[in-house]
Image: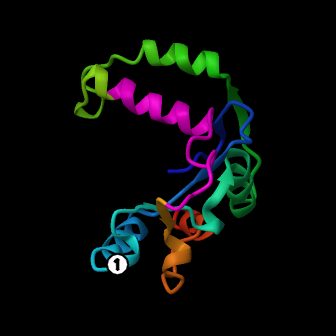
Amino acid sequence: MPPRDRVSIFGDGNQKVVFMDEDDVATYTIKTVDDSRTLNKTLYLRPPKNIVTHNQLVEKWEKLTNQTLEKVHISAQDFLASIKGAHKPSFLGMDEKAIQAGLARIYHIYYEGCLMSFAIGNEGEEASKLYPEVQYTSVDEYLQRYL
C-alpha cells in the first residue's frame, strides 16, 4: 500500500525513475517474441507517462488522497549504511546476500539514476515507441487502485 501518513524519499527525490505495471512488462515482452525489429536488441521499458521522480510520485499520491505526507529524506550515506545492517535471515525468505543485492539495486536506481542516465542507442528499442498500440498503465492509473 502507498503510505498514508509518512513517506521515505531517497536522496533529494529528484532522480527520474521508471515505474511499470507487471502486466505491461509481460505484454511488451510477449510482443517481442516474433518481432524481427527486436532480434538481437535490448528492449527498454520507459513509457513517457511513467517516468517520474520520487517527489512527483509522492505529489501524485498526495493529490489523489487529498493529504499531505510527512517526507523523510534518506541520504545516500544513510541508505548505504542500512545495507550493511540488512541481515534479517527470514525477510521474505531471502538470505542476507539477496537482501543486500536488492537494496543495492534500489541505490543505483534512486541515487544514481541508472534507469534514465543513458540514451537508447542502436542496440535497443523503447517498447512504447515500438508498440504504440499498447495501452500501458500510467502511474496515475496504478495509484487509483489504492484509493
Asked if residue 28 is positioned above or below residue 115 in the image, the reply reads below
Q: Residue at x 34, y 79 (%)?
A: 35
Depth check: 37 or 68 in front?
Answer: 37
Q: Which residues are magenta?
A: 99-122
- Name the residue carrying label 1: 36
Depth check: 3 or 24 in front?
Answer: 24
Q: How many marks?
A: 1
Residue 139 position within the rendered picture, expressed as x and y whole percent measured from the top left: 60, 64
Indicate the quadrant containing the C terminus: top left, top right, bottom left or bottom right.
bottom right
Residue 64 position within the rendered picture, expressed as x and y whole percent measured from the top left: 70, 63
Residue 13 position within the rendered picture, expressed as x and y whole percent measured from the top left: 71, 39
Image-quadrant location for residue 76: top right
Residue 60 position within the rendered picture, expressed as x and y whole percent measured from the top left: 71, 58
Q: Residue at x 32, y 19 (%)?
A: 88
* Residue 108 lies in the magenta-colored region: yes
Mark 1 crowdedness (10 Å alpha carbons): few <14, some 14-19, many ≥20 = few
Mark 1 lies on a secondary structure that is helix
Image-based side of 58 in relation to 136, left or right = right
* Residue 53 lies in the magenta-colored region: no
Depth check: 128 or 10 in front?
Answer: 128
Asked if residue 12 is positioned above or below residue 86 in the image, the reply reads below
Q: Residue at x 54, y 56 (%)?
A: 19
Name the residue furthest bottom: 133
